[in-house]
Image (cartoon, rainbow, N blue to C red):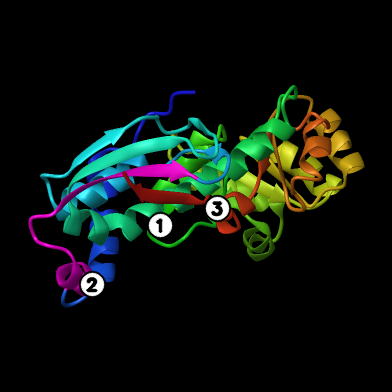
Amino acid sequence: MKVEPLPDLLVDPIVRAALAEDLGRAGDITSQACIDSEAWMSARFVARKPGVLSGLACARLAFSSLNPDLRFEPHLADASALKPGEAIATVTGSARSILSAERTALNLMGRLSGIASLTAAYVAKTSGTGARIIDTRKTTPMLRALEKYAVRCGGGANHRFGLDDAILIKDNHVAACGGVREAVRRARAAAGHMVRLEVEVDSLEQLREALEAGPDIVMLDNFSLADLEAAVALAGGRVVLEASGGVNLETVAAIARTGIDLISVGALTHSAPVLDIGLDAA
């Protein structure tokens, strides 16, 4: 699967901030003390466990930001399936520079590959159904663009990126407006013609009210499997239906089989374990 990479313009500031955090006030004093300034080395990124790759640009930019003379050669592309022991990329050049950028490169690549790998596991569980796995806004502050990119590398799709690109009326909005119908009415009146509108409901009764109000998407929050099936029948394809809440790798297949359109999973970004990737001197 090919995934369109993020522009360096978006990734570079994040990588530079991570490098600055690690280098601190005096730089890598260990490498400065132990490694000759003229020493060169070659090292390979290697997968320690199976998974899905994401974050190559982060590693490349970590090295080039610190030393533009370093040569970074990828052997795989993002979204590639990884086997233990498989070489991902090789970096060659100043030993000091490579060792100074190593942890930043590994942290970001491991984090994003972990998200891609967990997403791929959810996608595999829903194979053969019409349901799509999507993420949420439960992301690491300042890393949202990278983490949502990693979800795409794993075969998932993205929910809204922020508060400004779609209207999502949640339970507290409904309570403040006095009901689903009124909340949707107000949102429709205020929204531009390009803005999609989603409303969250927690019962079949609220779903009926939502269908009368005419949103684009309805989020079914913590519905039972029986109620999800009833919701699909009730909606009859008039709106996109999203299942949310109580989703994990043990439950997602059954949720997908109800005929739901979307399954949102916060765990993709807030609970994905880091994929074990190492950098080995050649």
Mark 3–mark 2 CB contact (< 8 Å) = no
Of the residues tagged 2 and 1, which is closer to the observer?
Answer: 2
Q: Which of marks 3 and 1 is nearer the N terminus?
A: 1
Residue 269 is labelled as 3
Of the residues tagged 3 and 2, which is closer to the observer?
Answer: 2
Residue type at tag 1: Asn
Residue 34 covered by magenta stretch:
yes
Tell me: residue 186, above or below residue 25: above
x, y percentage for residue 19? 25, 62
For label 1, the SS is helix
Instruction: Give the CA distance from mark 3 to mark 2.
Output: 33 Å
Residue at 85 percent across and 29 percent down: it is 233
Q: Is residue 236 left or right of residue 157?
A: right
Q: What stretch is highlighted in magenta?
A: 27-47
Q: Quadrant of residue 257?
A: top right
Residue 30 is labelled as 2
x, y percentage for residue 114? 53, 48
Residue type at tag 3: Thr
Q: Which of marks 3 and 2 is nearer the N terminus?
A: 2
Q: Residue under circle 1?
A: 107
Of the residues tagged 3 and 1, which is closer to the observer?
Answer: 1
Extreme residue toward the right, this view: 226
Q: Earlier in the sequence, mark 2 or mark 1?
A: 2
Q: In which quarter of the image is the C terminus?
A: top left
